[in-house]
Image (tube, helix red, strand yellow):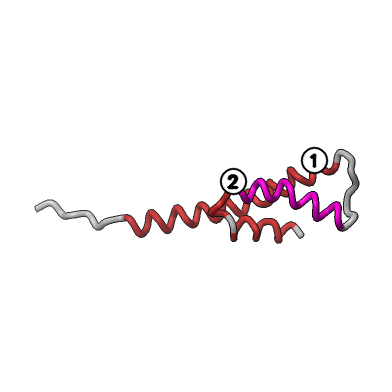
Amino acid sequence: MIPTMILFGLVFGRWWRASLLAAAVFWPAVLLAGDAIGLDGSLMMAAALGVLNVSAGVAIHQSVLWIVRNTITQRPRAKNP
């Protein structure tokens, strides 16, 4: 399930704040619904790991976006005579 969270970050990385917030809320909810964890201290750890995984996808998305924007906006330099 971990690659799913990274994929979520890759797809929604443009809206990185909302993506991280959604990961903190929905990942523990998914684990609770699937009876993978209980309502103890592991709930906060699940939220932290969800945010960490989504942030990896967001970082990749933002890096690619930065490279593409810099490549498009570069102008050829004029040669000095």
Q: Look at the image and tell me in which quarter the N terminus lies.
A: bottom right
In this rendering, the answer to whether 34 lies above or below 51 is below
Residue at 83%, 53% (x, y): give it. 31
Most extreme residue toward the top is 41
Q: Tell me where residue 35 sits by quadrant.
A: bottom right
Question: Which residue matches tag 2?
Answer: 17
Q: Classify residue 71 by image quadrant.
A: bottom left
Q: Is residue 25 magenta?
A: yes
**Amino acid identity at mark 2:** Arg
Q: Distance between the residues labelled 2 and 1?
A: 19 Å
Residue drawn 24% across the image and 57% down it? 76
Instruction: Name the amino acid, label 1.
Output: Met
Which secondary structure type mostly characterizes the magenta part of the structure? helix
Please provide the residue range marked out in magenta.
17-33
Q: Which mark is residue 57?
A: none
Mark 2 element type = helix
User: Which is nearer the N-term, disc 2 or disc 1?
Assistant: 2
Marks 1 and 2: in contact by CB < 8 Å? Answer: no
Residue behind mark 1 = 44
Q: Position of residue 14 (x, y in %)?
A: 53, 54
Residue for point 79% across, 49% down = 28
Look at discs 2 and 1 and give the one toward the viewer. 2
